[in-house]
Amino acid sequence: MLARLLAAALTLPLAANATAQSLFEAHPIATVPDGIELEGPPLVGPDGKTYEVRSRLVWSPDGLQVAYVGYSDGATHPVVGDHVEKAHDYVNQPAFGPTGDVVVFRLGDRRNKKKESWFLYRGPDEKPSKKQDWIGTPSISPDGKRIVAWTQPGAKLDAQGYYTRRNVVFWGGWKRGKKWNDALCLQEPVFSPNGDRVFSAVQKGPEWSVVAIDRKGEKEIEKGFSLVREVVAHPGGEKVATTATVQPDSADLVGADLAALMGAHRVVYEGEVYGADFDHSCAPVFSPDGRHLAYKVVKDEAMGIAIDGDADAGTPWDYVTRPVFAPGSELVAYVGNRGSELKGLLRIQVSSDLRDRGGVDQVIVADLDGTERPVGETAARIDHVVWGPGEEQLAYAARTEDGWRIVCGDATSEPFDEIGPPVFDESGAMIAFGARKDRAITWEVLDLGG
């Protein structure tokens, strides 16, 4: 019953001018409403440091909508376009589905000292999902017709405000979910490319497994991990690569840092460990043709990218972002950083690329044999590296002295306060992207002069 309810009425209506707008025509999207700010109250971390809280805008892939977390007098609101929803105690970063017409926020409210209430908000014109005692990070299917997440029925808080351990259940699948001791609840479950199954990782007793979820139910397809930190689907839709933790020998723990105490991160695919010659390997990415595997590696506090089990891959950087394969599967791009402030576990978490890292960024392109070369100029921050259809055609967002710009070869956009991922047209002659300047949120187009 739950699956049928989720599959129904999940579409957020497009902007009124949707049929008239082209993806490669510049147009206004929204304005940050009066009384809403993008910066929230600062947070004090476990290390005692104060961290800035700033909302990141998320543009729909079709260029017609924007969503984000808005702040007003200390309260947090989901914002879609010009609509500000009422405040909730917890508002997580929104996500759009691949088709652009579905948006979802994860929201929560404290009910009393021991209980909270969580649900998924899907925009002003859709009914929210059924409330749960706790719900994890949602994921949207490729066709936008299914939303899934992990839940924790009966979840309760202890005297310190932390959740007590209870079984978790997959929510939104084709059949009622099983009970598991734990799962990758705060990572998006991973859909296969055609959307007919979902992959995640679960704990049963002391061991973790990779689970595949489809119309037949839930099946453990890889077992025996001490901990799984990430699952990545193969383009063929049947297999996965994982980042798993290998626990260290007790003799190696004397004087070790937190990353070592947590165990070595290792990329595993079809039973083979990738990156065993390094201190850590993580963030696996398959090539579009499924024949190659690239991933981050760490050795002696330095980082690099390895491809297909290369034990001699260099680690010349203080930090690297997740690699991106070119459409032809024979080139890899990533951002290398010098002077990064990210150390230890902060460098190898799934969310590390989103963190402020400091230092100086440089786009790097690598061949399958590991030969590397820089692309473009260095910048204080580089995000959203995207391959175009042209030969070795790359675009990315670079933060310069006067703001964020889209860069592609010699072409550069005007500066903005915030910028989204670049989208190439089929010919590689134009790039579209979301942008914000002050409170105006727009969809912009950069003509590459092709």
Image: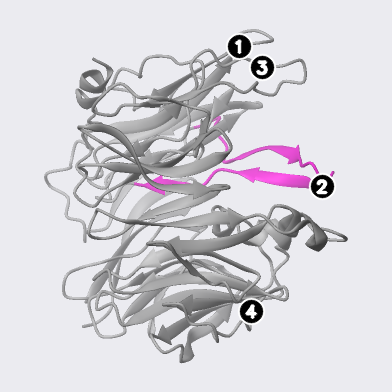
Quarter of the figure with residue 42: top right
Mark 2 vs mark 3: in front: 3
Where does label 2 land, which residue?
49
Where does label 1 land, which residue?
115
Q: Earlier in the sequence, mark 4 or mark 3?
A: 3
| Residue at the outermost right position | 255
Q: Earlier in the sequence, mark 4 or mark 1?
A: 1
Instruction: Specify the quadrant that holds the C terminus.
Output: bottom left
Pinpoint residue 85: horizontal percent, then vertical percent.
44, 23
Q: Are marks 1 and 3 in contact (CB under 8 Å)?
A: yes
The magenta stretch is 34-59
Q: Nearer the viewer, residue 259 or 70?
A: 259
Element type at mark 2: loop
Residue at position x 77%, y 42% in the image: 45
Quarter of the figure with residue 244: bottom right
Q: CA distance from mark 2 to mark 1?
A: 29 Å
As shown in the figure, which amino acid type bears the numbered disc 1?
A: Lys
Q: CA distance from mark 4 to mark 2?
A: 25 Å
Where does label 4 land, which residue?
317
As shown in the figure, which amino acid type bears the numbered disc 4?
A: Trp
